[in-house]
Image (spheres, rainbow, N blue to C red):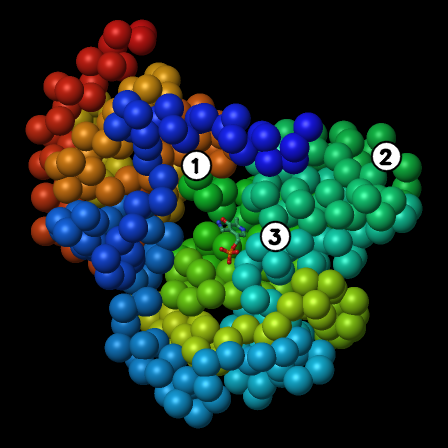
Amino acid sequence: MDLLEKCRAYTRADEARDVGLYPFYPAFQGPAEGGQAVLDGAEVCMLGSSGYRALSVNAQVIGAAQDAIALYGTSATGSRLLSGNLDLHENLEADLADFFGYEAALVFSTGYMTNLGVVSALAGPGDQVFLDEKAHASLIDGARLAEASGAVVRHFAHNDPNDLARQLAAAPSTSSLVATDGVFSMEGDLAPVAELVAICEEFGATLLVDDAHGVGVFGRGRGVVEQTGMRGRVPLMTLTFSKALASQGGAVLADAKTIDFLRHTSRTQIFSSGLSPADTAAAHAALREVRRHAEAEPDALAAAAYLRRALDALGYDVADSAGPVIPVRFPDQLSMLSAQRLLVEHGIYTNAVLPPAGEGHQLRIACTDAHTPDVLEAAIGVFASLREDLLPRYRQAA
Ligand code: PMP
């Protein structure tokens, strides 16, 4: 059969389009971060961005990216190993290591490539990888590559240190990597980092925390490792620049020898071009902004706490979550997609989450520093006015 036959037979997206409930790939006309965004020519309240600190529209960050283009051009035009290494990359790495309390850092061209490249370079024949069952796709894919080269991959129950301990106790005593998200992107819940550290130390396993969603938000900007008091005890931390740090790219933090090993062996580092000058400079400027305001709690947290309480009071099913992410649960896919569409029609953009991105049927709402009380009040007004349309769906299903 023709390889592309499966594409012609693919109808899922068309089925959703046909009934006017296709929620993906909206094209925003302008910044998709911040309190407001423009969609189909109309202003919408953006409640779907992970730009938690609203820094992609910050003058310092934009200026740094513009200056970098003027001085370095638009592209690194080569792998860092050969011709694409810039002092901009190394200066950013030095500041990342210093801020997060590690000996060294290595910048990659996306957060996804960071996890893929780190896990697959570190785990190979004879090693074991233990992943939280809800770990991000980039950790899962890194583990798949490790498995292809001979590592054994296992999954432990979500945020369940006891299950991890049981599995480590039962596994052969060989070198193990334990990997988890710091903040889970869809539900917004935090990993029990202190318990995971204790177990990894007991069993001699190496812990990797991917803090894509915690950096810039928790622990005085340093993420959940700092927030849980585990600074210095998590040997590997990864992060992305594409959320609070308002850019593109990612980084791994570790001891100097591990970073040197990854610089020379990680395939997503070696076989991919260096991060562009503008992205590197923007991430660096955003890091400086986070550091400058590190002692103040991000407005995104207060905004999310306020919105979560308001939605709960209105009768929406908001699950337990601590940070800027608020999952709003619906009983089935149709009610969730209808709610997403209705909210867009009323000027509120939220993310529709379908498997494999998340379980169940939920809208993912995220607050940023740009969600001022006025913006939130307007959004809450819409959720209140649509209550009668959206909430009966809960009751019908109950
Ligand atoms: N890890 C987690 C937990 C994420 O949510 C994401 C992005 N969705 C990534 C890694 C990948 O980051 P990037 O967008 O920079 O590739």
Spot occupied by residue 27 in the image (x, y as percentages of width and height): 29, 50
- In the image, what residue occupies the spot 75% across and 54% down? 120
| Gap between marks 2 and 1 measured at Cα | 30 Å
SS type, badge 3: strand
Viewer-nearest of labels 2 and 1?
Answer: 1
Q: What is the CA distance from the residue labelled 2 to the residue labelled 3?
A: 21 Å
Q: Which mark is residue 209?
A: 3
Residue at 56% x, 80% y is 76
Query: What quarter of the picture does the N terminus occupy?
Result: top right
Q: Earlier in the sequence, mark 1 or mark 3?
A: 1
Q: Determine the secondary structure under disc 2.
A: loop
Q: Give x and y (percent) for residue 385.
A: 9, 28
Q: Earlier in the sequence, mark 2 or mark 1?
A: 2
- In terms of secondary structure, where does tag 1 sit? loop
The answer to which image quadrant residue 141 occupies is top right
Disc number at residue 187?
1
- What residue appears at the point 28 percent right and 40 percent down from the top-left corner? 350
